Image (cartoon, rainbow, N blue to C red):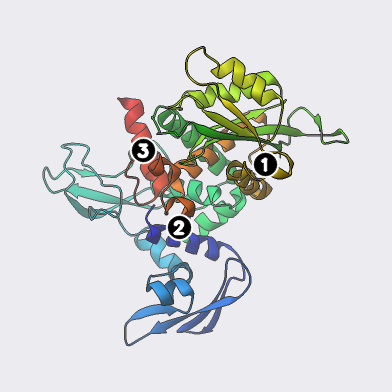
Amino acid sequence: MNTDDGRKLRGLAIVAQAGTIERISPSKYRVLSQSGKGWYQVTWKSGGGEWKCNCPDAETRGVTCKHIFAVSYSLTLRDRVSSQSSFEAPNNSGDTEAIICPECGSPEHKPSGFRKNKPGKVQRWECEACHHRFVDNEGFVKMKHDGEIVAVAITLYFKGQSYRSVVDTIEQIYGIVVDHSTVIRWMQKYVQLAKAFVDGLDPETSGVYHVDEMIVHVRKTEPIKVGVEGKEGNYSWLWNLMDHDTRFLLASMISKRRSIEDARAVFKQAKKLMRKKPLAMVHDGLQAYPEAGVKEFYTNKGPKMEDIRSVGQRDRGLNQRVERINNTIRDREKTMRGMDHDESAQVTADGMRINYNFIRPNMALENKTPAEAAGLKLGLKGIRWKALIKKATKASAS
């Protein structure tokens, strides 16, 4: 997703929350910072015919910030629903995923009205080469709702909104009412489609890997005992394994135990995407890791894998890269309403892995995604989840 589309989605998230925008006058608004620690002022400049904001992003970089997008959305919700979607129509400028004519394959096209269906209007295009009229819905054929709405819903969920909050945002922005269970089905369907595609790719890896496990709450799973006191609750274990250099998540797996066989299953999943045999595995000291590593990676040829335990005063902090992901998941878990069973928890974990690797730029990687850092240049533009779903659909059909 380019930075402009990212600000649009953050603007949507602001609008979805009550009390975040206050009207001072017809040309002046206050927008609450997403940190909740202050307000920014958005003002209409009649001389320049545009909105201005006093946030650092707008003042320093001169860009259209998320606060301006939020005010624009809040003022024009119904107009946008009746005329077009809340995102500009895709074009071939390079800022969005190119639209291809399904009849002749030409990328040259122009808007040709809208197709009206029960949920609302969908943009129709006319190919300038063969004059075929079509709707850009690859990956979303036979879906009741437009692909953009589906992709925005998935994006907002993995940005931290709950399913019910996503439903409220979709209704406010698009004027379309969907049930939260529908959004759950969208997420599960397209995460599994995307997983089949991305797990067949070949990322560059360094040979140094980080692995860690954490407890997650799964409401309808078999109770287990956790912690020093052995407290029983509806929990499962989530394992994450990451490459050191690219921060690419190679595996995310749900299990009921922390046995050698469970650790080995994580290693097996990650090994499918490892370009290099592990030179070192950094972990938190769980005894299952070195024993599983010997069983899964030991050979008579090549150097033995180094077992690095991030425990004790001297070595503490060596595993921060993957532990930071766990902290993000811990914060995100508060709105994970779809984690009813271990199966749905696994889909959610897969979706978070895909979102982390392919959708979300990482500041530590010079604003690249881990996938881009690992040499996987898929050219995802516009709404990245939509672009990824389109590529996954093409791959599954070939």
Disc 2 is placed on an element classified as helix
The residue sitting at 32% across, 87% down in the picture is 47
The residue sitting at 60% across, 15% down in the picture is 295
* Residue 352 found in image quarter: top right
The residues bearing labels 2 and 1 have C-alpha atoms spaced at a distance of 51 Å
* Residue 372 found in image quarter: top left
Q: Is mark 3 in CB contact (under 8 Å) with mark 1?
A: no
> Residue 160 in the image: x percent, y percent?
58, 52
**85 horizontally vs 350: left or right:** left
Q: Which residue is mark 2?
A: 174
Q: Mark 1: which amino acid?
A: Asp
Q: Mark 2: which amino acid?
A: Tyr
First-in-chain label (3 vs 1): 1
Tell which of 311 and 397 is nearer to you.
311
The residue sitting at 56% across, 62% down in the picture is 16
Q: Which residue is mark 1?
A: 315
Closer to the eye: label 3 or 2: 3
**65 horizontally vs 40: left or right:** left
Closer to the eye: label 3 or 1: 1
Q: Residues within 10 Å of mark 3 (few under 14, many from 20)?
A: some
Disc marking residue 376: 3
Residue found at the very far right of the displayed protein:
229
Q: Is residue 128 visible?
A: yes
Tell which of 302 and 105 is nearer to you.
302
Q: Is mark 2 in CB contact (under 8 Å) with mark 1?
A: no
First-in-chain label (2 vs 1): 2
First-in-chain label (3 vs 2): 2
The residues bearing labels 3 and 2 have C-alpha atoms spaced at a distance of 33 Å
